[in-house]
Amino acid sequence: MGASSVPSISIGERAKPGAGHALYQQIVGHAMEHGKAHSGYHNKNYVLPSTGLMAQLLGAESGMSVTVRMRRAGVLPVVIRTWQNEAEILRAVRAALPHVPECLFEGDGFAVHSYVEGVPLSSVCGNGKPVDTLLIEEIARLLAQVTQVRRGTLPALPASWPSNGHDGQAFLQTLAHCADQQIRRANLRAYGGLFAALGIPEDALTRFAERVPAMARRPYSLLHADLHRDNLIVTYGGQPSLICVDWELATYGDPLHDLATHLVRMHYPRHQWSEVIEAWARAMERTRPGAVNGVGKDLDHYVAFEQAQSVYPDVMRAATSLDESFDQKGLDEATSAVRRALEVAQAPLRLRQLPSEAEIESVLFRWRISRGKARNGLFSSFRTAHWKPDRRVPERPDFPYRAVRGALHAEGAAPAGRVFKGTGHLNSVVRVPGIEFPVVVRRKVKKVFRRERSFLSEHAVLRAIEISRVSVAAPRVLALGESYPGKYRKDSFAIHTYEGPLDIDRPPNHPVHGLLPHEADRLVDQLSALKDVDYTRLDPAAGEAGYRFYSYLSEQLVLLVENLPKESQQLARQLGLPDAGRLRQILARHEVTDRRPILLHGDLNPWNLVRRDDAMALTIIDWEMAVVGDPLYDLVRHMHLTPTRPEIRDRMFRRWERLLPDAYTHAWQQDWRVYRWIEVVRSAYVDLDRLVTGASLDAPNVRRAVDSYAMTLAAAIASLGLPVRATANPHLARALA
C-alpha cells in the first residue's frame, strides 16, 4: 500500500470497525521492525519516531517519538483492574497532569502513546536504595495532583463500587473482593491446587475483608495504584522533573490506598517510610486536606492488603519461571521467591504455619512436572513422575505401578477443591486413566511436630484391616514409596483409595455437628468389628500379661507434658496446670479395669469420619494415631472430640455393650468417666501448646478446639482437683476466654 493511499487518522480517534487489522499491520509491523523494545509484564512497548507512513497513520508530526504498547498474549491476570481502557483514563488525567502520555491511537490489542522523554527512576536509583528527599517531595506532589482529577471526567465505575464516596472500610473490602475475583479465582484452575498445597486457605481474602475495621472518612479520588520506580520517569529537561506513566491499573477510592501501594512497590528502605508519609501528608494538606484524616491509624490496613494480595501474583510468577529455567538454580530461586511471598503475607492473611523450603521445593517440582515438558533446564526431560516403591506395600493388581506414576503425575495439577491440608498430611485427590476409582496421594507435612506420638504405621494398620475382611469401612493402601528419588529430592508418599463422594469435585461431608442416630449405630458396629483384626503383627506386646492400657495412656500424657516447649510449659504453670511430675502423681490416683485389647483408631474426631450413602454410613480415615488398647477408650475419645448429645451417647454405649463380649466391656460404667477426664486434661495441654506455637491451627478440628479453650482449661483444672490460679496478668485469662 502506498503512502498516498493510507487514510489519515486524527489524534485520539479510535479505530473504526474493519480498519483495525490493516492499521495493526502497518503500525505494529513498523514498530516491531524499527522500534526499541521495552518489555514490561503486561505490555511490550516499542519506542520509535513517527516518520513517513507511521506519521500519516497517526496524523502526528513527522519525527515525533511515540510508544507502541502491545498487550502481551497469555499473561496471567495478576492485578486488579477497575477500568479496561487506559486511553479513557489518560484523557481524563490530562487536565490535571498535562505531561502524562497522550493516547494517539487505539487498535485491537495495541495503542500508540506519545513518548515521555527521560529515564525510569529504577535505572538511576534501583529498588531498595534510598530516594533523594527532593524526589520524595516531588512524588508526593504528583500523588496529590492525581486527586485533583474530576470524577465526572472518569469512566463509569463498576456496579459493585461503594456508593459512599468517603467510606474507607467499604473501599478496602471492595479491593479485597476484587483481588479474590480477578486474581485468585481467575487463576484457580491452573494454580488453585498450588495455593492449597502451600497452605493458603481458599477464603483467605474473604476473611481479610471481614476483618477490615471502620476507618476515618476520607474523600474518594482518582488513584494511580501502581506508582513504582519503573513508572516514574525522570525527565531530561526538569520541567516537570517527574512524570508518571502506565495508568492501566488506576482506580477510584481512598487516597491512602495510593500511598500504601506506592510505599510497598517502591521498595523504599524502611527508614524512609516515615519521610514519605510525612511528605505525602504535607502535599495533601495543600490540595485535598480531607485525605489525611486518620492516616496514622488507617494506613497499616492498606499496607496489609497490599502485602496480602501480592502472595498470589508472586507465587504464580515464581512457579511459571520454571517454564524457562527448570534446573536446580531455577528451582532454588523460585522456592526462595515463594518463601518470601508467604512470609510477607503471613500476618495479614493469618497464615498459621508456613511450609519449609524443602516442602515448597517439592510442591513446585510436582506442580511443574504435572504441566508437561519444560523448555529448558536439567529437569526439563522429566515428562512423568519418577518414584521408588517401598516394598512393604507390594504392587497390587488393581493398582499397578503404572497407575502409581499416573497418580503422581496428576497430583501436582490437582485443583484447589481436591487438595486438603490437615494436621499432619497434604492430601491430593486425583483420577488415574484406566483406574475406575479415585485415589488420594498423601504426603506428610514435614514441619508439623505432633505432640501426641504415633506408634503404628498407618499402611500396616490399613493392610491388617483389609486382610481381616471385617466390616470396617476404611481406605485401602495402594502404594508406598518415594517420588523423584536420587540426587535431587526424596519425598515420601502413600496412595490410598479416596473415600469421599464419587464426584471428586464435591467436598467430603463430615459429621462436624455430631452423629445422626443411624450413623452412631454404624460407628459402634465398626469399632466393635475391630476386635477381629489380628493386632499381634502390629503390636505383639499389647496382649501380654501385665499390659495395662491406662498406665500406658497416663505415661504418654506425662511424657507429652514433659516435652512441651519451655514457653508452653511456662504458660501452663501460669494458668494453674501441673508440671509433669505433679501430673504423674494425680493420674496415679485412678485405676481402670483391665479389658481385652483390640485395635483402636485413636483419633475419632469428626473430620476423620466421612459420610457415605450406603449401609455403612461412615468411612473411618486417617489411621496414623492407631494403637492397641482398651476398646472403651476409642468410644470415649470420640465423644470428647465430637459434639455428642446425651441421648446419642447413651445409645452408643448400649449398642457397644450389646455387640461386644463381656471380656471387652465389663465394668465400663465405672471407667468411662476416667477416660473422659484424662482426655479433658490432655486437651488442656495440647490445645494450649497449639495456641502458643501456632501449630496446625488451620486444621478445622484444631481450630474448633482452641476456640473453646477457656472452657477446656476450666474443666481440666476442676477435674484435677486444683484451685483456679489468679494469674499475674489478669488480661491473660481474659484473652483466652
Image (tube, grey):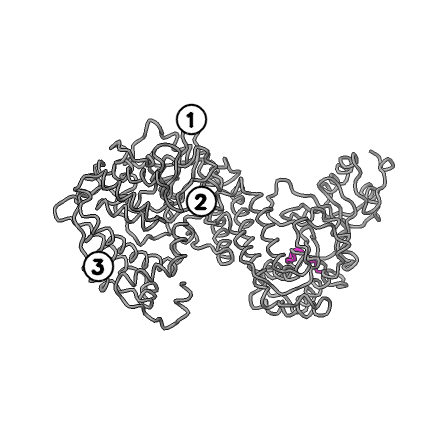
Q: Residues within 10 Å of mark 1 (few under 14, many from 20)?
A: few
User: In front of the other: label 3 or label 1?
Assistant: 3
Secondary structure beneath dot 3 equals helix
Q: Is residue 604 above or below residue 251?
A: above
Q: Quadrant of residue 484?
A: top left
Q: Quadrant of the N terminus?
A: top right
In percent of width and height, residue 30 lies at 75, 40
Give the mark, 1 or 2, whose residue is nearer the N terminus.
Answer: 2
- The stretch of residues the image draws in magenta is 226-234
Q: Is residue 231 above or below residue 134?
A: above
The residue tagged 2 is 363
- Looking at the rendered structure, the kind of residue marked 2 is Val
The residue tagged 1 is 434
| Residue 372 horizontal side relative to residue 280, left or right | left
The residue tagged 3 is 587
Work out whether residue 538 can be spotted. Answer: yes
Disc 3 and disc 1: Cα gap in Å?
55 Å
- Looking at the rendered structure, the kind of residue marked 3 is Leu
In percent of width and height, residue 261 lies at 61, 58
What residue is shown at x 54% (from left), y 55% (from top)? 210
What residue is shown at x 23% (from left), y 42% (from top)? 657
Give the mark, 3 or 1, whose residue is nearer the N terminus.
Answer: 1
User: In front of the other: label 3 or label 2?
Assistant: 3
Queried whether the magenta region covers residue 653, the answer comes back as no
